[in-house]
Amino acid sequence: MNINLKSAWMVLFACVTLFIVGCQTQTVEPTPETPVTEAVVPKAPIVNPCPECGQKQEFRGEFVYFADSAILQVCGSGMPLAVLANPKMQLAYELHRSAPEAPLYFVATGQVELRPSMEEGLMQKVLIIDGDNWYFDARGRCQ
């Protein structure tokens, strides 16, 4: 598959995933049995939206810097994860990539946090890198 096409698919997948997560709200219309004055709350189990948040760990995957956004396709899960990138990371990516927007194998130690997304009212998982504990490996691959 063409590298630029693969990058475009990765970004599209990340956008669709964020859209689907944002659309999973439920609207309950009042009925004659439940007047508007009563609170209508659907019963749902309490679920932690980010069980991996706050746990420092090593992340490996294919990193792409695209339109001022850094995305890591995590090895083994296929999960796209936004990365809080810095200028040093962006420069290293540009120096080691094979072509613009080409995926580049990336290893980092950090933790996932829920942060406000660019979509109003939504949250997204973001990888926060632990200092300079990251590197690119042009020969590395997800297994």
Image: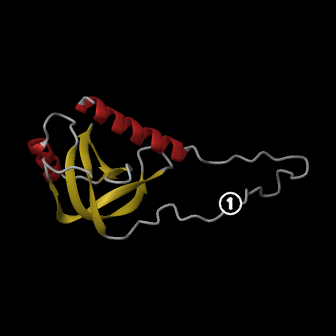
Residue 128 picture quarter: bottom left
Q: Single out the residue that lies furthest toward the bottom.
A: 55
Q: Single out the residue that lies furthest toward the left.
A: 95
Look at 17% across and 47% down and name the residue there. 90
Q: What is the secondary structure assignment of the residue under circle 1?
A: loop
Look at 35% across and 34% down and name the residue there. 9
Q: Is residue 137 above or below residue 68?
A: below
- Between 138 and 84, the one lying in front of the other is 138
Q: Left or right: where does residue 4 sit relative to residue 96?
A: right
Which image quarter holds the N terminus? top left
Residue 91 point in image, percent of width and height: 12, 46
The way the protein has been coloured in the rendering is: secondary structure
Residue 28 point in image, percent of width and height: 74, 48
Label 1 Cα neighbours within 10 Å, binned few <14 / some 14-19 / many ≥20: few
User: Which residue is disc 1 drawn over?
Assistant: 44
Q: Single out the residue that lies furthest toward the front.
A: 143
Residue 13 point in image, percent of width and height: 41, 39
The kind of residue on which mark 1 rests is Ala
Q: Is residue 114 above or below residue 7?
A: below
- Between 97 and 40, the one lying in front of the other is 97
Look at 77% across and 58% down and name the residue there. 39
Residue 143 point in image, percent of width and height: 27, 52
Q: How many marks?
A: 1
